[in-house]
Amino acid sequence: MGLFSKKPQLPDYDKEDCEAKKKRMREIFNETVEDGDSYEILYAYMTSSKFEHGWFFDTNTTSFYDYIVGYRDSDFDVILIQIDPELKEHTDAWHIDMDKIVNVSYDPKIYQVCFKYEKGSRDYGELLKIKGSDRKTMYGPKNIYQPEEREKFLDFAEAFRATLEQKGYKLDKWKR
């Protein structure tokens, strides 16, 4: 180790609370999705920023959207359910149209997976940040530590990339 290098620290989280939240996420997913147990799940969030010029002050607003992501390897189905930070309320299930996905990329610095839609779609893609959270998180559910779930989801994304390559799509570089 060098003079200025830091030893990586594990996130500060409460294990019992983490397991309770994962159990609650599974309950929400199963009550919302038919055959919910056939899906693997994990927590993800998305952000959107809006910048406005004002007379005296410029404002930048960032919105956070929390999701339960369900995915199934057998048919490459991905479902998103938006949740509140307390895991009390949620929306209906929303399927990502995987037939319109033309690229899958991953940014390991910010733990972001991007499912990019084909040209002509109304959205660019789904930018899922799959890092998890700790006790000091200021947004979303706290205490969701999910390294195993993240690795399984990245395996799923790589397998889907392989099918896109077989279809002849030009893909961005993939680095884990």
Image: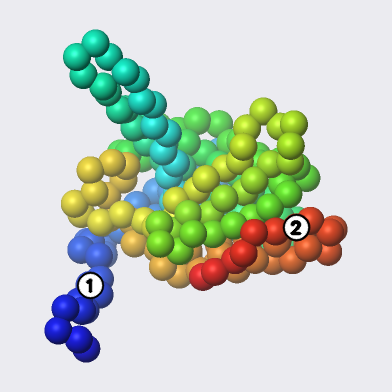
Q: Is residue 29 left or right of residue 73?
A: left
Q: Amino acid at mark 1?
A: Gln
Asked if residue 31 shows in the view, the reply is no
| Residue 173: x %, y % from top left | 62, 64
Residue at the spot 68% in from the left edge and 52% down from the top edge: 103
Label 1 sits on a secondary structure element that is loop
Residue 53: image location, x then y, percent: 32, 18
Above or below, 19 against 137 in this view is: below
Horizontal and vertical percent position of residue 63: 36, 31
Asked which secondary structure carries label 2, the reply is: loop
Check the picture and name the quadrant holding the N terminus. Answer: bottom left
Task: Tell which residue pokes out farthest to the front in this image.
Answer: 55
Q: Amino acid at mark 2?
A: Lys
Horizontally, is 163 left or right of 41 in the view?
right
> Reading the chain from its start, which is encountered first: label 1 or label 2?
1
> Quick one: 34 or 106, which is closer to the camera?
106
What colour-coding does the image apply? rainbow
Looking at the picture, tell me which residue is in the foreground, 24 or 138: 138
Identify the residue position indicated by label 1 in the image.
9
Q: Which residue is mark 2?
A: 170
